Amino acid sequence: MPEEMVATRALETTSGGAQQVDVAVVGAGFAGLYLLHRLRKAGFTTVALDEAADVGGTWYWNRYPGARCDIQTIDYSYTFDPELEKAWTWSEKYATQPEILRYLGFVADRYDLRRDIRFGTKVNSATWDETTERWLLTTDNGAPVSCRDYIMATGCLSAPKPPEIEGVNDFKGEVYFTSRWPHHGVKLAGKRVAVIGTGSSGIQSIPLIAEQAAQLTVFQRTPNFALPAHNGPSPADRLALLEGDRAAYREQARWSMVGVPYPQQTVVSWQLSDAERRERFETAWAAGDLVHILTQLWADQGVDTDGNALVAELIREKIRGIVKDPETAAALSPTDHPFGSKRPCLDTNYYATYNRPNVSLVNLRQEPITAITASGIKTDKRHFDVDVIVFATGFDAMTGAITAIHPITGRGGKSLSDVWAGGPQSYLGLTVSGFPNFFMITGPGSPSVLSNMAPSIEQHVDWVVDRLIAMREQGLTTIDATETAQAGWAQHMADCATLTLHRLANTWYTGANVPGKPQGVMPYTGGVGPYRSICNEVVGKGMLGFRLTGPNGAAQCNDGEIVRLQPDVRLVLNMLAEMNLPPLESFGAQGARDFVNEFNAARPAGRPVGEVGTGTLMGADGPLPYRLYRPATPGPHPIVVYFHGGGWVLGDELSDDPFCRDMCRRTGMIFASVGYRHAPEHRFPAAAEDGFAATRWIAEHAAELGGRPGPVLVAGWSAGANIAAVTCQLARDRGGPEIAGQLLVCPVTDCSFDRASYNDNATGYFLTRSLMYWFWDLYCSPADRTDPRVSPLRGKLEGLPPAFIATCEFDPLRDEGIAYAEALTATGVPVTQLQAKGHFHSSFTMVDVVITGVSGRATMARALRGFAGLSQEEAGVRPNVPPQEINAAAS
């Protein structure tokens, strides 16, 4: 439909009563403007409503001194129209608020968007009418609006958080809020100014206020990490990348983790020397690029407390080097949250400002504010007379701007505020179950504030408008998320959050800055590219998780959860799928070994332990190699005899090196990884007999190995877990050695292939049903497969040592592992099960790749220590978590 016809139709339906449109949009910032453009091109009649007097959204209101973007403006720009990109050139690397506002005004003029915007208009309520299947919006200015679809483009940081300090209204001087700075100039020269808050707006404004004020007193409760912006022209290297192939640059941004085209860092902190880490840090510090320093130092900085602490200390070192007064420097140095768990700030001379004679810092952790008086601010130790108070206290983030429209009433009179009373619920961060035809742009549950907002906004807008077009073409009129899909998304959000360190900070990301607000990580932490992939997958699976209806009873519902895998498992499996590898069994035994060895060589190195040694021991038919991992703590230590995975065909004593290192560190115990004989050169029962012989030899030589005399423990993964289980039965039947406990991770326990997990997980999860057939055929003839030395589930189970058995949801071996645990329990053997939701066969051994396996390994470590009679407080053992399920925590 031509744009002129759309405009005419919108005007014709505005006379009398409610303004009738297809779509109503709340907000006229980055998201609202692009929505208007796309909706109009698609032929929908549209109106946007905004309290402001002009376009700009958050950039209309946030005019405080020093307000700038913290994403380079060549990235923080619209990308939907190449001609628009050619028509606008940014003057600086980080544009100021006035320039960004001019840019948005330029966009509004270029596409004639203002004619569809009602400025100075606040939406007071929004109600879904079941009969007409339309939303009715009441406003404080002009006619109400009736619309088929209702889209919130109100932004994530647009609802100011009021101060919670007694006596605010008693102050007789000037009061300003960075979130609602006056549009006229504010004169601070010669005045005594107080700034309360050192978040982003405080850090940006304090240096400029200090240049004007006679005296500036900064009141800080929580210090934040700040990095120098080194503002100036856009960096030549970034410009060259953009201009060399603009389309490719933008596409890389759309599929990146944060919406800016930087590569994924792969090296981890402990692989680097102190000098190498410092060199990387200094490069990032000099670059003045927030995304660079958050993503390009080492791969574990955002997911591992140790890797993160290295970055944090380097920044604190910089603060101490800039701020001359040691007490002030210490107060400005964050120690209560990991770097990046709160939004780090970009600054210009922020720390150096505290060296000025007219600037002082009040540490509210040591002397909290008790009241605001008529003449100033009172702490529990003193009173500060001031002429001006600036509140840099931030926003009711993510949900505040949405729930500020009260009430939003959906199906059956359901209130959004009530639905969100315990925290925001959404599907994809786009929709809320029970609120048909209601959409949020960058809402809670989407990447939003953890991303470059520009590509995230464009992705959301495109997804929503494309869905409205598709519904129109199919003759469907309503769309609503199902409760199942929404609950599944909440679980996926929680799984993603445990990958990062955001959960360890009190921040506006979690709602902790607003008293009484339910706390939880509100933005999607799984990354921009993965999120885009999931949204596309929803569409590809027939709008999975949505119920769509139309006239005359037309209906479509494909219910379910879009993501059931743990987020890092999903990434690993997608990577493997993209490699398009032939089946492992097609390589042949030696070819498969070569491939696995090459694959293992490319993975992150295992973490340091006290000592790693090698040796040989006597197996059932000759010497076998072993690798020994000793803790850094003084011995002697209990010994765990470990057997690697690989279907009795692949691997060696080195192949599970990261897992052995990790468990050695977590348990404070020696791990002895045994290289047993492999099929097809050595078929059944070679591996089983080697396992028993190795365990006996290690028990007999425990003292020589630095171990504690007495019972040993056995552990293994996959076929190695099979050997460990068999070893326990053989040791019982052959008079020793004494085994204190067994750890079986994804064990092979039976020769039967008829359990459900063999069908449910036959393909797609790396270990396939056909690969297991191949392993069995190479190792054991059909006539021997019921022998308990290869199918321990068929053996005598009474009198075995206590067991910890871990299984994974997406593993062909899942059900036989559970069956073994249940059979052991039935005979009186103490068993703890860990059924790992969302994990696959290799989750626990892919250390520092599948981060969500961490809490499972921590639980295994506690079990092993318990078997050995050790306390749980030693060796850095983590607090207890329920063993039934993994919602993993970062290490």
Image (spheres, grey):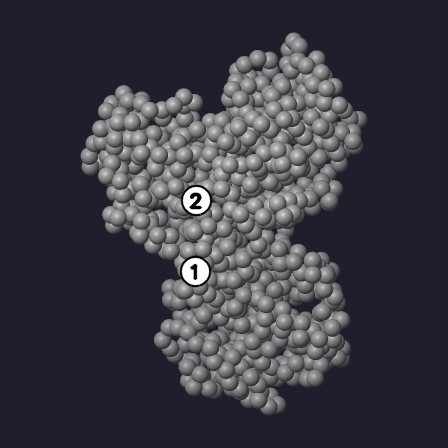
Label 2 is placed on what type of residue? Ala
Residue 694 coordinates in the image, percent (x, y): 55, 84
Residue 129 coordinates in the image, percent (x, y): 65, 21
**In percent of the image, x 47 and y 32: which residue is there?**
97
Label 1 is placed on what type of residue? Glu
Q: Which quadrant does the N terminus fall into?
A: top right
Q: Which mark is residue 229?
A: 2
Q: Is residue 342 visible?
A: no
Q: Residues within 10 Å of mark 1 (few under 14, many from 20)?
A: few
Report, in whole angstroms, how far the alpha carbon at label 2 lies from the one at label 1: 19 Å
Cβ–Cβ under 8 Å for marks 2 and 1: no
The tag earlier along the polypeptide, 2 or 1, is 2
| Residue 381 placement, left or right of 271 | left
Q: Residues within 10 Å of mark 2 (few under 14, many from 20)?
A: many
Element marked by disc 2? loop
**In percent of the image, x 52 and y 62: which residue is there?**
267
Q: Nearer the viewer, residue 8 or 434?
A: 8
**In percent of the image, x 44 and y 72: which residue is there?**
609
Element marked by disc 1? helix
Q: Nearer the viewer, residue 858 or 576?
A: 576
The residue to which callout 1 is attached is 279
Residue 58 coordinates in the image, percent (x, y): 50, 30
| Vertical side of 679 occupied by 657: above or below | above
In which quarter of the view is residue 19 placed?
top right
| Vertical side of 744 occupied by 446: above or below | above
